[in-house]
Amino acid sequence: KNQVEQSPQSLIILEGKNCTLQCNYTVSPFSNLRWYKQDTGRGPVSLTIMTFSENTKSNGRYTATLDADTKQSSLHITASQLSDSASYICVVSRSLNSGYSTLTFGKGTMLLVSP
Amino acid sequence: ETGVTQSPTHLIKTRGQQVTLRCSSQSGHNTVSWYQQALGQGPQFIFQYYREEENGRGNFPPRFSGLQFPNYSSELNVNALELDDSALYLCASSSNYGYTFGSGTRLTVV
């Protein structure tokens, strides 16, 4: 079954601290893996996208890693800010024989950055 | 470059009614997909349209239907609304590997 599992479910950290979010997937055939940030009641906003051959991708204070062999990814946030408080969703894209791709979403990790 | 716009932003409907949600796609994107996101959950794939034809569908009943128009905008129609249909409905337009999400329509069924 194509699934994306994220951990932890929720996380509280102090402003300025670093944190790492985890994502495990069983989606096949794998096309790419994306991390999105979603503010409450808003649409997801893309942070990073990685294909099979990429094992790290940075976007400012966000650094994502991908181990395609173990089907694991992580999102590391450095020097957290209050505005980082949001849900972080791991999304895996798979390409089907018909030529189109679909996205499978994790449930997200709810991050709260406390002053 | 325009983003993805969804309307309305909020909607309250009564059980058994029908609803139509609308989505404009980002310029240059010819594929639109719809997702249902229940509170505290990740989005679930409903269906996808490419050049006005449905080319993918998730595990949703036939009362969830859609359309894509020649300008690549799209509608999601839900008939015979149920209480469990209450959710944030997200639309995403895409081309190749780029997906852009709208802000969603919050549907409440009472």
Image (cartoon, rainbow, N blue to C red):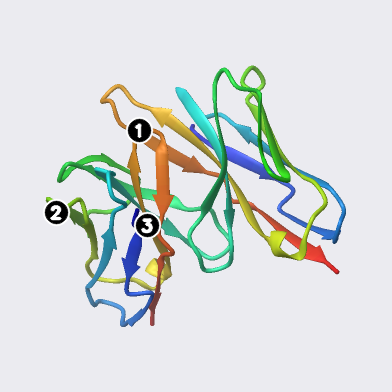
At which x and y percent is residue B29?
28, 44
As rendered, which of B15 and A18 lies closer to the eye? A18
A54 to A62, vertically: above or below: above
Q: Secondary structure at mark 3?
A: loop
Give the residue displayed 58% in from the left and 67% down from the top.
A40
The outermost residue toward the front is B1
Decide: is B45 above or below A1: below
Q: Which mark is residue A72?
A: none
- Side of A56 where B5 appears, left or right: left
- Judging by the rendered image, the residue that carries numbered circle 1 is B96
Horizontal and vertical percent for residue A79? 83, 51
Tell me if residue A28 can be seen: no
In the rendered image, which residue does mark 2 sit on? Answer: B69
Residue tagged by mark 3? B3
Which chain is indicated by disc 2? B
Left or right of A17? Residue B17 is left
Query: Closer to the N terminus: mark 2 or mark 1?
Result: 2
B101 or B21: nearer the viewer: B101
Mark 3 or 1: in front is 3
* Residue at (27% x, 59% y) in the render: B24
| Above or below: residue A97 compared with residue A64 | above
Q: In which quadrant of the rendered view does residue B3 lie?
A: bottom left
**Badge 2 amino acid:** Phe
Direction from residue A12 to residue B5 in the image, left or right: left
Q: N-terminal of the two: label 3 or label 2?
A: 3
Residue at position x 32%, y 52% from top? B26
